[in-house]
Image (cartoon, helix red, strand yellow):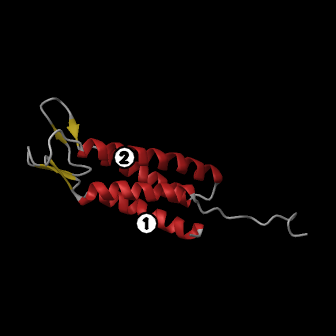
């Protein structure tokens, strides 16, 4: 794929990733609660679940902004942030879908979309759109 197409796909994926944080991710049958990226619930042990969207959304927005900056340092920072975002989304998938008992957690579309979109965002950061400038030396 040409870098321009990957650039457009990356920008659309960043917006879709933010939207996927608002979708239902998992449903826990034992407590009858459905989690999204922003549904925060405090449990008796003091553990909060549902704050993953608060990390994913700013990272996706920063990646989107850096895709628009035509500097090489922005592309390198973008690659680093996309790698961190993908790793965080994999961690979120494992955390939200892990259970001790079979059938306790029902995985919904949002958790899959967050993982897939973060991977596509990483691919678009690996193949950035870089405008080449024609130098006077090459025109001889």
Disc 2 target residue: 90
Residue in the image at 13% along x and 49% along y: 103
Q: Residues within 10 Å of mark 2 (few under 14, many from 20)?
A: some
Residue at 82% x, 64% y: name it: 135
Location of the C terminus (image quadrant): bottom right
| 13 versus 103 height, above or below | below
Outermost front residue? 102
Tell me residue 111's x, y (percent): 28, 54
From this view, report whether residue 107 is shown above or below residue 84. Answer: below
Q: Earlier in the sequence, mark 1 or mark 2?
A: 1
Which numbered disc covers residue 12?
1
Q: Is residue 80 visible?
A: yes
Q: CA distance from mark 1 to mark 2?
A: 20 Å
Place of residue 58 in the rendered image (x, y in percent of width and height, measured from the top left): 40, 49
Residue at the (25%, 45%) spot, across then down: 96
Q: Is residue 127 shown left or right of residue 16?
A: right
At a point 64% along the width and 53% down the height, the residue shown is: 72
Q: Where residue 84 sits in the image (x, y, percent)?
A: 45, 44
Please indicate, yes or no, whether residue 52 appears anywhere in the rendered image. Answer: no
Q: State which mark lies toward you, 1 or 2.
A: 2
Residue 52 location (% of width, % of height): 30, 45
- Choose between 11 and 27: the one closer to the eye: 27
46, above or below 62, in the image: above
User: Left or right of 8: which side holds 107?
Assistant: left
Q: Residues within 10 Å of mark 1 (few under 14, many from 20)?
A: some
Q: Secondary structure at mark 1?
A: helix
User: Along the line of sight, which residue is nearer the eye, 126 or 23?
Assistant: 126
Give the SS element for disc 2.
helix
């Amino acid at each position: 794929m040409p870098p321009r197409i990957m650039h457009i796909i990356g920008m659309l994926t960043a917006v879709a990733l933010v939207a996927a944080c608002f979708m239902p991710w998992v449903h826990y049958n034992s407590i009858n609660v459905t989690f999204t990226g922003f549904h925060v619930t405090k449990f008796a042990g003091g553990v909060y679940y549902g704050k993953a969207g608060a990390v994913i959304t700013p990272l996706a927005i920063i990646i989107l902004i850096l895709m628009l900056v035509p500097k090489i340092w922005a592309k390198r920072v973008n690659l680093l942030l996309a790698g961190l975002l993908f790793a965080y989304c994999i961690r979120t998938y494992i955390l939200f879908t892990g259970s001790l008992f079979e059938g306790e957690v029902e995985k919904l579309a949002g958790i899959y979309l967050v993982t897939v979109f973060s991977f596509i965002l990483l691919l678009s950061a690996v193949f950035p759109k870089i405008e080449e400038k024609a130098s006077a030396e090459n025109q001889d």
